[in-house]
């Protein structure tokens, strides 16, 4: 089947408009259908129990004090602490049962006979099974009692501290704020068990699973899971057929003169771009060290191998789990992004032989600005969560407190500005190619990919701490999911295409066609595929069928990426030992394989609605996230670093031994961590939830089970290898800084072996 590049470009434009219409309509629907925040909640006597403003203030406390990176809300956040929605719903059911048991039998619920317990449980379930028709929320006497009990428990836990749970003293700095946080969490519990007007299930599609409140998986979850399984088989088959029928060219070194690293001169801007590498390596090392600490927190919730006894300092008070996890997540994004930005500025001279005036100065300026943003953002998180940034500036300069979007809005704006500056510098570097190729050419594709990352990031500016949590989550997932399943995947295929062209392994026109087709598949599925994150957060149930279909179809571009990885492996092995870029290829191939495993295999099965209903927010998601984020995006970044260094170092002084050691440490370590520890814990959680309740699977009692603790210890070898590999890598980066080649004094196109051929390939 022959498909022209212009035809693919037209289809991409149609898909873009279709996505815009669907997700634009979804945004309108999000505001119309979000769970209402009432003016007040009243008891049976009409007295006000909580006001709408107190619920909003509770959401601010939740964000300001970093509670989303300690536990989760509506299943989204960290898995160390409880899910606040499920926890408050579970506590509400328990206290209501105790209230009715005392009222009717003058006894505690646990002391009742089984038939009496069943009768009381039935009363509680009927109490909670109501529909909201506007106005104040009206509590029964039992609900009012339960609300106050939960308030008291949350003050004790999150203000006074609970080291057994890993909660530091003054995590929430005032009793009033802790009570308001409880009000906010209880409001999410309320709309999780309250039916939508005219509906037969709650605002969250009856999530979380809590039989005592009448919450169980809906029929739609089962129906669309079956349909998704059918689509999986059909989609996989379609992906294989499409790949084979279109006959995309695979990279090959046969009959081609692959430019040796010594055949090109290093431009000043490339030397400047290389400075991104040691900065990113430092961020990477800090990230994995924090990851080791976070893993250990699940074993010792208030200590670290007795450090607090030796030095008299509680690490939990100095560096709580919430701050450590926030930094761990943000550092992961930042080191990968910094590496990609550096690679995006390093590659253009290889393709164009063009060095714009003062380009190296501007690249150095961009790096300095990124360092300022990183230090300011990470410092603001600590200062904000510790209460040093108060007043209205806490979410501007400090800790906005939403997972993956934790840094204050000022620093987020700095990140956005950094992407825009990168785009300008890339345009300058790629200008000779941009001027010669059509708007769907390879150089344009890399700009579209980078620009889409910046464009989607703007969704993070469409909400404030006062915004309804359901609407906040709608926009937050625009950034997080559409980055990971859309823009990042687009960037991967674009930068790999650019790299293969720079190695002379693919013609530019062939690479353009392959990149455009994969970008089309990513855009066709990944953008609307975000909707599987809307199933349980208070969005309408129309997203269940939409999310099921498009999440399943996300497998198709991953099939292409896997085939591409296999093709790259064949090219590497077919070229023999003389092929100079075997090591960068190893990283790129690993990226494709882990992308298929992490995003495809582990991502698909947890996104079946029926599985996701019970699994949402468990360690199965942790396995998927680590394999996909580091496995796919991290390995690509490291492969680009390897390629950049190999070109920038004198060939007779190049030594890839340490990088090869690091490569195998990372691969083996990631596999051990995911498959020996993380996934088994997730399957045990899934079983506990399915046979009990969601709150049971996220409880301290679950994590403290001997078998679960053993599995946490089993993570140690994998984590150790990950840290060791990163330490070797960071040390090698420092070592290689002393053997970099000097830059050409006045480089031109004749100094780059492949550039003239690229420009002539029209």
Image (cartoon, grey):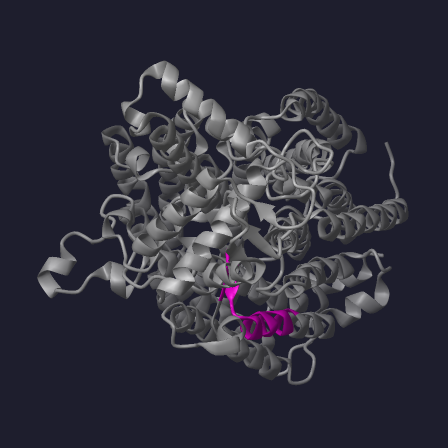
Q: Residue furthest left?
A: 310
**Up-down relation of residue 404 to residue 342 (above or below):** above
Q: Magenta stretch: residue 582 in it?
A: no
Residue at x 47% of width, y 30% of height: 124
Q: Nearer the viewer, residue 108 or 569?
A: 108
- Closer-to-camera residue (541/275): 541
Which stretch is magenta?
Answer: 400-419
Camera sees residue 584: no
The image quadrant that residue 546 belongs to is top right
Is residue 288 left or right of 396 when viewed as pictured? left
Residue 678 in view here = yes
Q: Relative to the observer, which residue lies in front, 511 or 18? A: 18
Tell whether 700 sits left or right of 287.
left
Q: Position of residue 673 (x, y in %)?
A: 36, 39
Report which quarter residue 419 is drawn in.
bottom right
706 sits to left or right of 250: left
């Amino acid at each position: 089947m022959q498909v022209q590049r212009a035809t693919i470009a037209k289809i991409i434009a149609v898909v873009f408009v279709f996505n815009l219409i669907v997700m634009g309509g979804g945004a309108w629907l999000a505001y119309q259908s979000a769970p209402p925040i009432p003016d007040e909640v009243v008891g049976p006597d009409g007295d006000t129990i909580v006001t709408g403003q107190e619920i909003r203030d509770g959401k601010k406390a939740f964000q300001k004090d970093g509670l989303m990176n300690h536990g989760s809300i509506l299943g989204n956040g960290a898995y160390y602490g409880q899910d606040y929605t499920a926890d408050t719903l579970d506590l509400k059911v328990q206290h209501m049962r105790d209230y009715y048991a005392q009222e009717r039998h003058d006894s505690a619920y646990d002391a009742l006979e089984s038939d009496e317990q069943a009768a009381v449980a039935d009363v509680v379930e009927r109490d909670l099974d109501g529909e909201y028709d506007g106005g104040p929320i009206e509590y029964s006497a039992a609900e009012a009692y339960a609300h106050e009990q939960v308030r008291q428990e949350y003050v004790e836990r999150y203000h006074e501290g609970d080291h057994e749970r890993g909660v530091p003293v003054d995590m929430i700095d005032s009793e009033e704020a802790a009570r308001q946080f409880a009000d906010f969490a209880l409001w999410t519990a309320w709309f999780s068990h309250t039916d939508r007007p005219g509906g037969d299930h709650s605002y969250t599609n009856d999530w979380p699973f809590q039989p005592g409140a009448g919450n169980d998986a809906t029929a739609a979850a089962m129906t669309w899971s079956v349909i998704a399984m059918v689509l999986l088989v059909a989609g996989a088959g379609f992906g294989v057929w499409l790949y084979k029928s279109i006959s995309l060219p695979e990279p090959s070194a046969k009959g081609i003169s692959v430019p040796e690293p010594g055949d090109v001169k290093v431009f000043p801007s490339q030397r400047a771009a290389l400075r991104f590498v040691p900065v990113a390596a430092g961020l990477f090392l800090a990230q994995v060290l924090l990851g080791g600490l976070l893993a250990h927190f699940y074993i010792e919730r208030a200590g670290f191998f007795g450090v607090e006894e030796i030095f008299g300092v509680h690490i939990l008070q100095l560096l709580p789990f919430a701050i450590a996890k926030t930094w761990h997540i943000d550092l992961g994004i930042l080191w990968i992004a910094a590496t990609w930005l550096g690679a995006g500025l390093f590659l253009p001279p290889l393709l164009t032989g063009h060095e714009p005036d003062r380009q190296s100065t501007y690249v150095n300026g961009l790096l300095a600005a990124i360092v300022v943003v990183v230090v300011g953002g990470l410092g603001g998180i600590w200062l904000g969560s510790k209460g040093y940034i108060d007043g209205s500036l806490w979410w501007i300069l400090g800790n906005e407190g939403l997972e993956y979007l934790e840094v204050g809005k000022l620093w987020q704006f700095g990140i956005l500005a950094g992407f825009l500056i990168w785009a300008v510098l890339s345009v300058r570097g790629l200008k000779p190619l941009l001027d010669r190729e059509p708007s769907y050419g390879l150089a344009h594709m890399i700009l579209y990919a980078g620009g889409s990352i910046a464009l989607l990031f703007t969704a993070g500016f469409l909400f404030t701490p006062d915004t309804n949590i359901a609407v906040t989550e709608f926009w937050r997932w625009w950034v997080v999911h559409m980055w990971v399943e859309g823009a990042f995947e687009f960037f991967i295929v674009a930068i790999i295409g650019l790299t293969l062209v720079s190695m002379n392994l693919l013609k530019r026109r062939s690479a353009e066609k392959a990149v455009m087709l994969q970008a089309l598949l990513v855009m066709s599925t990944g953008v609307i595929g975000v909707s599987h994150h809307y199933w349980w957060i208070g969005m309408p149930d129309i997203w269940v069928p939409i999310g099921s279909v498009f999440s399943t179809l996300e497998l198709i571009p991953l099939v292409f990426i896997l085939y591409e990885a296999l093709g790259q492996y064949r090219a590497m092995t077919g070229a023999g030992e003389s092929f100079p870029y075997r090591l960068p290829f190893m990283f790129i191939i690993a990226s494709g394989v882990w992308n298929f495993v992490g995003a495809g295999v582990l991502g698909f099965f947890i996104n079946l609605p029926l599985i996701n209903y019970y699994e949402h927010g468990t360690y199965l998601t942790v396995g998927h996230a680590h394999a996909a984020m580091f496995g796919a995006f991290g390995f690509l970044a490291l492969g680009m670093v390897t390629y950049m260094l190999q070109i920038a170092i004198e060939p007779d002084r190049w030594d890839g031994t340490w990088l090869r050691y690091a490569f195998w440490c990372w691969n083996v370590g990631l596999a051990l961590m995911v498959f020996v520890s993380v996934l088994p814990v997730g399957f045990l959680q899934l079983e506990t939830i399915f046979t009990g309740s969601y709150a049971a699977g996220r409880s301290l009692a679950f994590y403290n089970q001997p078998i679960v603790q053993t599995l946490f210890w089993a993570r140690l070898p994998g984590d150790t290898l990950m840290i060791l590999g990163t330490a070797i890598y960071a040390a090698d980066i420092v070592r290689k800084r002393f053997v970099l080649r000097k830059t050409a004094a006045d480089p031109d196109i004749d100094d780059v072996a492949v550039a003239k051929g690229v420009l002539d390939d029209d």
